[in-house]
Image: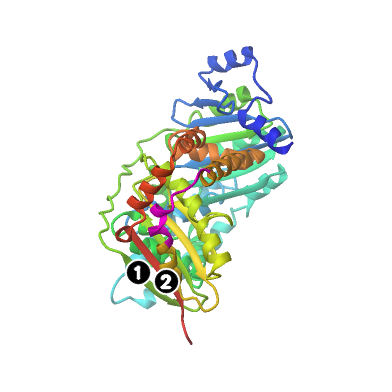
Amino acid sequence: MRVVFLTILLLGRVNAMDESKINELKKLNAYVETNPKYPEIVYHKLKNGLKLIIFEKKFAPVASFAMIFKVGNVDNTSGQTGLAHLFEHMAFKGTDKIGTTNWKKEKEILEKIDKIYEELNIEDRKNEKDEEKIKKLKEEILKLENEAEKYQIREEFWKIYNELGQSQMNAFTSTDYTAYIVSLPSDRVESYFIIESDRFKNPALRDFYKERDVVLEELRMNKSDPSRVSWENLLSHAFVAHPYHNPTIGFEDDVSHLTRKDAIDFYNKFYLPNNATLAVVGDVNAIDIIKLAEKYFGDWKEGIIPNQNYTKEPPQNAEKIIKVYFPSKPSLKIGFKNDGINTDDMPALIVASEILANGNTSRLYKKLVEEKKMALYVGSYYSTPGHRYPSLFTIVSAPKGDTTVEDLDNEIMKEIENFPNNPPNEWEIQKVINNYEMNILKDLESNLEFAKTLAYNEQILGNWKFSWDMIEKIKKVKSKDIVDAVKKYLKRNRRTAVYLLEEKK
């Protein structure tokens, strides 16, 4: 019964719009998807370039919002790694209206703090530092921060949303993008547009240096996280030229010298309406949503998005094996270079990833975890760390018992290299299709997950229909296509392997 219900949802015809409503939406220059292979999405683009995607789902009085900007760690310039992530933190610090009792006076103090920090940065980067000068500058900053606090209303942004009955409010920065999400009672929809338009048009960036210290502490804690250490080593060694090699949270020296002015410049470059997509899913009226978006976001000025064609990664011609000694249990991460999400081979690689190492019926799971009991787990993903540029087909695992990381690696490679001799059968391919379709259905169960998927597809993958179009491509994949993709991409000279080995005390 649940599958039938979700299938109806997938087709988007539970609350199918009547002709008069579709005509009214068209008068607003909105596009209504009527093809039954897709959900009944309403798409509207504001004159400033902001893309709006709406899905009416009237099962509970809740509306979910996902705003995605095409800016992530990959867009940080040299010397400013971690800035995208730090700015995301700052987006919760209020605006020139939210979080202040007197913005004019507070702003004057913040700008004084900025000037002193710039002076402090210059002194701190000298080979021979004037420690006495540094001490005095820090004392001046502390005094000014205490003065600024007199005009600040702590956590007012959160308090407002909590009073509105928010749930799931969050934000996150990835390699490719930054997302801001929240769910609200459907009778509070206009409040979302009032708050978020102010947030992205008038950010105050107050408490910048305090928040920078919070991020620095997070960064230091990450150094003791074995999973992060192994991932960072994989990306930094697999990518020698492309900025995918940088850690999302940034390098400590870079983050410790970021300034509020850097954040303002970053905001002006990337936080533009024509660099964003807003998806709204739930108990809403698409006509009302478009009118609210026009009312509150319509005057948000578009800009020229910086060139995001970064240094192309050169071909990898030799296998790389990196051994990292760390006080933790051993693990293995392997990354094979792929040619990007939009290549003709990608559907076959997606299927290969599922067949090889996703789920307890996958080949590597059955072989390594169940039969040989060499591994604690095994998993795979076709595109790490992102989708905007050519990335990595990754396999992760950890040895069990007396098995070494090297033994585990050899066994995985043996299975991959034997793949052409044991091509996928019809059942394996159909299982992948079923899983992919079910994942789309699961997204539809949650307003917020579906909003995130729609916004991500549109803003990062180029079309909100991406998931549905990809499943059609996957359905056309043949066993030979999968074998050819494995032979082409999962080769030793395209791979980087990180052995996380237990450091003996």
- Answer yes or no: is residue 71 visible: no
User: Which span is picked out in magenta?
Assistant: 415-426
Assign the N terminus to one quadrant of the image. Answer: top right
- Where is residue 42? Give x, y as percent: 56, 25
Q: Residue 268, relative to residue 23: is it above or below?
A: below
> Which x, y percent locates residue 237?
34, 64
**Hey, what amino acid is under mark 2?**
Tyr
Q: Residue at x 36, y 41 (%)?
A: 343
Per the image, the residue denoted by label 2 is: 499
Name which residue lies at 48% across and 26% down. 46
Tag 1: Cα neighbours inside 10 Å, few (<14), some, or many (≥20)?
Answer: some
Q: Amino acid at mark 1?
A: Ile
Q: Is residue 416 left or right of residue 172?
A: left
Mark 1, residue position: 321
Q: Is residue 273 above or below residue 354?
A: above
Most foreground residue, 321 or 374? 374
Is residue 418 on the magenta stretch?
Answer: yes
Labelled disc at residue 440:
none
Q: Secondary structure at mark 1?
A: strand
Q: Earlier in the sequence, mark 1 or mark 2?
A: 1
Tell whether label 2 touches label 1 (CB within 8 Å).
yes
Task: Tell me where residue 78 appears, x and y as whole percent.
Answer: 32, 57
Neighbourhood count class around disc 2 (C-alpha, 10 Å): few under 14, some 14–19, many 20 upward? many
Q: Is residue 487 above or below residue 68?
A: below
> Is residue 238 placed above or below 331 in the rendered structure?
above
Residue 279 in sight = yes
Residue 150 coordinates in the image, percent (x, y)? 59, 57
Q: CA distance from mark 1 to mark 2?
A: 7 Å
**Magenta residue check for 437:** no
> Mark 2 falls on what kind of element?
strand
Between 256 and 307, the one nearer to me in the picture: 307
